[in-house]
Amino acid sequence: MCDNLTSPLKPSSNLSTFQPFNPAAFVISLFRYLVITTQIPGRPIFFNLSTFQYFNFQYFNFQPFNLSIFQYFNFQPFNISIFNISIFNLSTFQLSMSSFKPLLFPVLLAALFWFVMFFPYLGLHLNFWLTMTVASLTLTLLAFVLGGKPDLRCSWSEVGWGIAIAIILWFVFWLGDKVSQLLFDFARPQVDLIYGIKGATSPSVIALLLLCIIGPGEELFWRGFIQRRLSQRWSPNVGFLLATLAYTLIHVASLNFMLVMAAMVCGILWGGLFRLFPKHFTAIVISHALWDAAAFVWFPF
């Protein structure tokens, strides 16, 4: 059965002309040719990602899900039409590389900043707070240049909502900290490593940077620019999912499970609020800044 499979590294015969190397297209082409075969007692599963079809799955006489809703249409290095996802009510989920180009450089730059700041074995010995401040200012500038002025509305109601969201999120993390310590032996040591980032920097300086630059900068970049542009290109749901996924994944460089989970929870909350209440973006920015200062300086866990 596997003799007819094409090597994932073999160039596609459908491409008659040479195309410059495109990393995203290369990854997708690898998945096209991937075949995973798993054995369940008495029943084989053949899940062929080259056509996104599910073959011969009958276990306990039911089919729990059918991946035939994921239909592969037209693969080209710079024009990729991949999914028809009925669960998101999308008639066609088209991924065009040209629409990714305005966001590709900023996201890769953010990933590079986070790698330099958090990867524990890099050995650069940079001042974390200085690097984080430079990163936040750079990404905020890119967000303004490439994405335009965000929809910020200053009012006391926005301030009140921002404070309320920050308080709720702090209690969510307080509870999560207690539960994680009961479930995982490594939870507390990893949280302590995160707080070790503070180093010898004055707490007042850290709080000021978090309130005025780092917290607002992250929100302006990830929700105000990345999620907004993705939502405009496809849909608010897709924009929320992709932006939250990217925001979570860039923290993987830390090799710290607790930090990655914290980023995921924050991304889901702030991204979900922006998905549901985009007109209240100011409150989301305020909540991010206040929560950062509270969690790191004022009321650490």
Image (cartoon, rainbow, N blue to C red):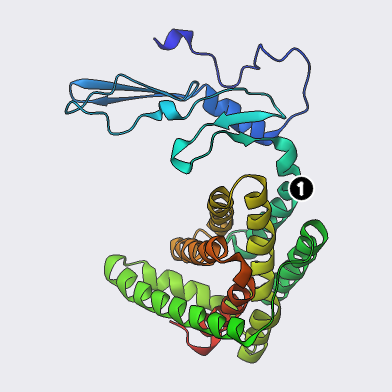
Horizontal and vertical percent position of residue 286: 61, 79
Q: The N terminus is located in which quarter?
A: top left
Residue at left offset 55%, top offset 62%: 271
Q: How many marks?
A: 1
Report the front residue among 95 and 45: 95
Above or below residue 60? Residue 225 is below
Above or below residue 101? Residue 252 is below
Horizontal and vertical percent position of residue 227: 63, 56
Amino acid beneath label 1: Pro
Report the front residue among 16 and 147: 147
Q: Is residue 181 left or right of residue 77?
A: left
Q: Is residue 125 visible?
A: no
Callout 1: SS: helix
Report the front residue among 271 and 130: 271
Q: Is residue 155 left or right of residue 269?
A: right
Report the front residue among 60 and 42: 60
Residue at left offset 74%, top offset 29%: 21
What crowding class fits label 1: few (fewer than 14 Cα within 10 Å), some (14-19), or many (20 or more)? some
Q: Which residue is mark 1?
A: 102
Q: Is residue 45 visible?
A: yes
Q: The C terminus is located in which quarter?
A: bottom left
Residue at left offset 62%, top offset 51%: 231
Horizontal and vertical percent position of residue 99: 72, 41
Residue at left offset 42%, top offset 25%: 68
Horizontal and vertical percent position of residue 214: 67, 74
